Amino acid sequence: DAGITQSPRHKVTETGTPVTLRCHQTENHRYMYWYRQDPGHGLRLIHYSYGVKDTDKGEVSDGYSVSRSKTEDFLLTLESATSSQTSVYFCAISEKGLPYEQYFGPGTRLTVT
Amino acid sequence: AQSVTQLGSHVSVSEGALVLLRCNYSSSVPPYLFWYVQYPNQGLQLLLKYTSAATLVKGINGFEAEFKKSETSFHLTKPSAHMSDAAEYFCAVGGFSGGYNKLIFGAGTRLAVHP
């Protein structure tokens, strides 16, 4: 299994509070991704990174920001959490771009009350 | 723009029966296609991928998929279902559309296997 960990694994927070999710990899892969998974929508890309300090938006980036100061860590921040951001968040890594596959972390279940 | 449609959000089969999960894609560039499986409370695991080599792709756990350009399809099959195949399956398309190097996922198909 690819060495990917996500923390926390579960979090409950209140509307309006900031939240940061962490993805940590031990594979030294260049690409890192944040997805959210919601019923009926599959996985949707929030942001991705193609190198240290190099990030770009995905299809559902509003309300989210990311940072990558080290190869191994990719942080996802919800500046002011809303109930619509209740979801399961997955981090993924890839050694290179397509067609190399992405390897997924175990996920973080976030509930915003 | 790229997109993926998975026909059938739920599929139920008997143990030992053929598994067929349908995926149709849309892509303005030559596509890369993937099937992932997700077991309960876990992340996604790659089953197989198409990268323009052979059109019939064999994956793990006895699954295979055939790329049909004329039908824009990449259906996933397994000759004989096993109880352990019960999971959610996602088809994804990737390509360099618009300069982005990323995957677009379908909504998923939940496979149930009954005795």
Image (cartoon, coloured by chain):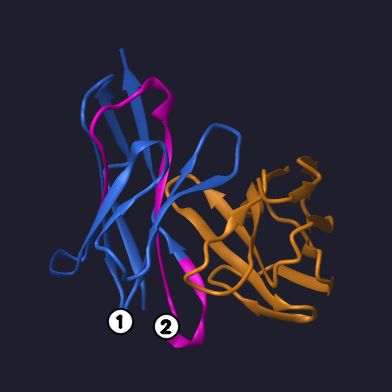
Dot 1 falls on which chain?
B
Q: Which chain is blue?
A: B
- Answer with the quarter of the image where residue A82 lies: bottom right
Q: Which residues are magenta?
A: B75-103
Mark 2 = which residue?
Answer: B97
Mark 2 surroundings: few (<14), some (14-19) or many (≥20) residues within 10 A: some
Placement of B7 over or under A52, stated as above or below: above
**Does label 1 or label 2 sit earlier along the sequence?**
1
Contact (Cβ within 8 Å) of mark 1 with mark 2: yes
Q: Does the magenta segment cover residue A84?
A: no
What amino acid is labelled 2 in the image?
Ser
- Answer with the quarter of the image where residue A60 lies: bottom right
Left/right of residue B100 with respect to residue A24 in the rendered view: left
The colour assigned to chain A within the rendered structure: orange
Left/right of residue B104 with respect to residue A112 in the rendered view: left
Q: Does the magenta segment cover residue B99?
A: yes
* Residue at the bottom extreme, as displayed: B99
Dot 2 falls on which chain?
B
* Residue at the top extreme, as displayed: B115
